[in-house]
Image: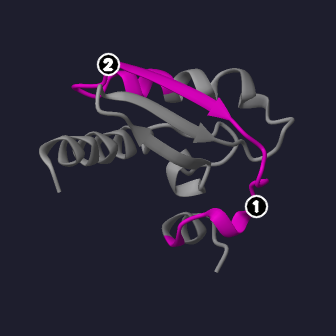
């Protein structure tokens, strides 16, 4: 692994930690554990691209969550820019949640 890719992995891990502080307003679990983050890419110039979804296309947080995700990513040291794309393919379903999220919501 070269230094560039190691740096990108460090930034990705820091972004994941930052996204664990973002919560869906209707569900008391962070969006990362909910499985709403589909992809995080960090390029060599530390521009971050995040693909995320919402629990439904009509989610009341659709207007605020992507902007909050972008701001959290931009706050990570070393990130030069962050772009967030909201996608609905594949559609989100509860199977995307982490074990911790399922436990928190009593889905076991």
Whether 47 is among the magenta residues is no
Viewer-closest of 94 and 90? 90
Spot occupied by residue 86 in the image (x, y as percentages of width and height): 69, 34
Q: Do the CB atoms of the residues marked 2 and 1 lie less than 8 Å apart?
A: no
Say which mark, if any, is on residue 80. Answer: 2
Q: Which residue is mark 1?
A: 93
Mark 2: secondary structure: loop
92 shown above or below 87:
below
As drawn, is 90 to the left or to the right of 51? right
Spot occupied by residue 82 in the image (x, y as percentages of width and height): 45, 23
Spot occupied by residue 31 in the image (x, y as percentages of width and height): 56, 46
| Res. 30 in view | no
What's drawn in magenta, residue-wise?
Answer: 70-99
Quadrant where the N terminus sits is: bottom left
61 shown above or below 12:
above
**Residue at figure coordinates x 66%, y 48% from the top left:** 27
| Colour convention | one colour
């Amino acid at each position: 692994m070269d230094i560039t890719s190691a740096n990108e992995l460090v930034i990705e891990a820091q972004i994941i930690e930052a996204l664990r502080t973002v919560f869906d307003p209707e569900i008391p679990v962070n969006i990362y554990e909910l499985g709403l983050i589909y992809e995080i890419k960090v390029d060599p110039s530390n521009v971050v691209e995040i693909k995320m979804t919402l629990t439904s296309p009509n989610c009341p947080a659709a207007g605020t969550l992507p902007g909050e995700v972008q701001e959290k990513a931009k706050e990570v040291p070393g990130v030069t820019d962050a772009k967030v794309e909201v996608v609905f393919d594949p559609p989100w379903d509860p199977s995307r949640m982490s074990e911790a999220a399922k436990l928190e919501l009593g889905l076991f």
